[in-house]
Image (cartoon, rainbow, N blue to C red):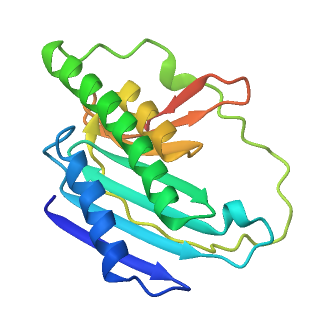
Amino acid sequence: MHIYQLSGRNMDVTDALRDYVEEKLTRLDRFSDQITEARVTLTVRDVRDAARRNRVEVQLNVPHGIVRAEEHHADMYAAIDRASDVLERQLRKFKTRYMRHRQVAAPEPEPGLAEQDVGVDDDIDDVPAEIVRQKRVDLRPMSPEDAVAQMEALGHDFYVFKNMATDGCAVVYRRRDGHYGLIEPN
């Protein structure tokens, strides 16, 4: 593990918790020795449901992607264990996909896939839109299939990436029918 960031929200991170998190993250190195950064946030929340009181969020940056887990539990150590298990499964899947794509040449994009109907609504209210959050992302070159895997791993409805087949910016998204769409500029 190269770069490691641990922070606590509404709590002090004890040396025991720090050591436990570091031990769990170090064990993940066996699944991917290319983890370039790990961000861990431990949060204690004021909620009635004790099982959701402690939250652990972990984001691992690996070449060509991000692996993320968020887990809740009444005990912080159990939440860390759960998050570690989720990350282990995701890293295994990620490594398998990555190795498979390295062995096989990149597939050609399906014709007409970029021409999917996005479903833009023509009736727009006169209320000005307010941007409430901004993010900057590194556009990593990958196939649309890898981008879908990243989107699913992050739990998002869309994912912006650099399509390695076209060398251009692209977006994959989850459609209402459960399938996926691909948006690419002309």
> Which percent across, then down, holds residue 12?
45, 87
- For residue 53, above or below residue 144: below
Q: Is residue 165 visible?
A: no
Residue in view at x 29 percent, y 24 percent: 97
Asked where in the image residue 64 lies, by quadrant, the reply is top left
Q: How many marks?
A: 0
- Tell me if residue 50 can be seen: yes
In the picture, residue 65 is in which quadrant? top left
- 56 sits left or right of 45 in the view: left
Position of 18 relative to 175 (above/below): below
Residue at image coords 30%, 31%: 92
Q: Is residue 89 above or below residue 115?
A: below
Which residue does the image show at 31% across and 74% down from the upper left?
18
Residue at 55% across / 23% down in the picture?
Answer: 115
Which residue is nearer to you in this view: 138 or 83?
A: 83
Q: Where is residue 131 drawn, in percent x and y?
A: 63, 72
Quarter of the image that includes the N terminus: bottom left
Q: In the image, residue 94 lies at what x, y percent?
A: 31, 32
In the rendered image, residue 46, in percent from the top left (x then y), is placed at 71, 79
The C terminus: image quadrant: top left
Q: On the image, which quarter does residue 175 sit in?
A: top right
